[in-house]
Amino acid sequence: MGKIAFVFPGQGAQYIGMAKQLCDQYPKALEIVKMASEVLGIDMEQMIFRGTDEELRVTENTQPAILTASAACLQPVIESGIEADFTAGLSLGEYTAHVYSGTFSFSDAVKLVRKRGKFMQEAVPQGLGSMIAILGMEREEILNVCAMAKSYGIVEPVNFNCPGQIVIAGEVKAVEKAADIALEKGAKRAVPLSVSAPFHSSMMAPAGEKLKAELEYVNIKKMRIPVFANVTGEIVPSENQVKDTLVHQVYSSVLWEDIVKNMIRKGVDKFIEIGPGKVLSGFIKKIDRKMTVLNVEDINSLDSALRVLKG
């Protein structure tokens, strides 16, 4: 029997109305949204189901909103009796993975990611940093490109998403120069990302320090399900290292391709992306076409996933 992994999306997956169908039909899903409203003192139902794209795009709103929607989408899966053997999430999604694993409570997580979003937004003034996805280049080539552009400022590879898609981030001039060099050296495309800061670059170090202080107040419990860390691509070895991996994650590269390959090595052949969008599903298919990749974000996708999983 192959193993199952639950994976959770990160920032950029949000849309107005995410998780609404499941919240309308599953009381436990709606409970999650109501709990987020209560804990944060914000009307999350209004923001997620009926708000504006502009409001949802503000990082300190986006992060708790995606965590809430993903945790809500998770509830009917749990109710159906399906359990994962491993779990992970892209960047912000790592917090949802920890909620699923039981490492920390949903209420602690949603408070934490709102602050994380605020700290990340404040770390670099608007307009000083940027992110560009480079398509059609290998890891080593990207590292060389960033080295060649570093005289223009900070530029680093920050997201190793899947073969042929690596995101670079840093100071605007240096990132643009690196993208130009990449295109000259044969990259297929360089796509600027619509983000407000150079996430996962070393420029985010001040946000990491602030997050470290907040994590002091969070009670870490035993992981029920092994969680893979973005910063290493491996399973977090012990509860003692959870806080450290989450602090480093803010200003370190996201090794998503490594996570997926390592899960496959451990026998995973079914991946279920739980929460808004299908970004991770696309990455996983590019990493290994043989995998069964499902998603759960509304009634239809839930029904399809359960049909496959319950066979």
Image: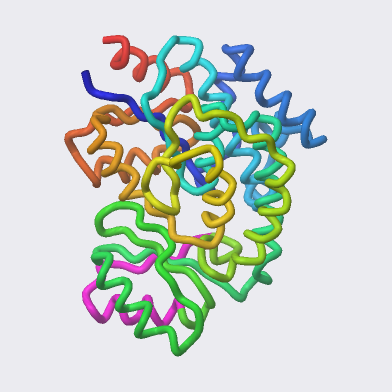
Q: Quadrant of the C terminus?
A: top left
Where residue 14 sits in the image (x, y, percent)? Answer: 55, 42
Residue 85 highlighted magenta (yes or no): no
| Horizontal arrangement in the rendering, residue 2 relative to residue 44 (left or right) | left
| Residue at 54 percent of width and 66 percent of height | 198
Residue 58, visible in the rendered structure: no
Q: Is residue 253 above or below residue 229?
A: below
| Horizontal arrangement in the rendering, residue 126 relative to residue 80 (left or right) | right
Residue 293, visible in the rendered structure: yes
Where residue 154 sits in the image (x, y, percent)? Answer: 50, 79
| Residue at 50 percent of width and 11 percent of height | 79
Q: Residue furthest right?
A: 41
| Residue at 63 percent of width and 50 percent of height | 57
Q: Residue furthest left?
A: 290
Q: Is residue 302 above or below residue 261?
A: above
Q: How many marks?
A: 0
Q: Quadrant of residue 3?
A: top left
Magenta extent: 175-194
| Horizontal arrangement in the rendering, residue 56 relative to residue 138 (left or right) | right
Q: Quadrant of residue 84?
A: top left
Residue 186 highlighted magenta (yes or no): yes
Where residue 1 sits in the image (x, y, percent)? Answer: 21, 18
Q: Nearer the viewer, residue 232 or 264?
A: 232
Q: Nearer the viewer, residue 185 or 117?
A: 117
Q: Nearer the viewer, residue 115 or 103?
A: 103
Instruction: Report the coloring of the rendering.
Output: rainbow
| Horizontal arrangement in the rendering, residue 238 relative to residue 307 (left or right) | right
| Residue at 73 percent of width and 25 percent of height | 35
Q: Quadrant of residue 184?
A: bottom left
Q: Is residue 118 above or below residue 276?
A: below
Where residue 258 sits in the image (x, y, percent)? Answer: 31, 49
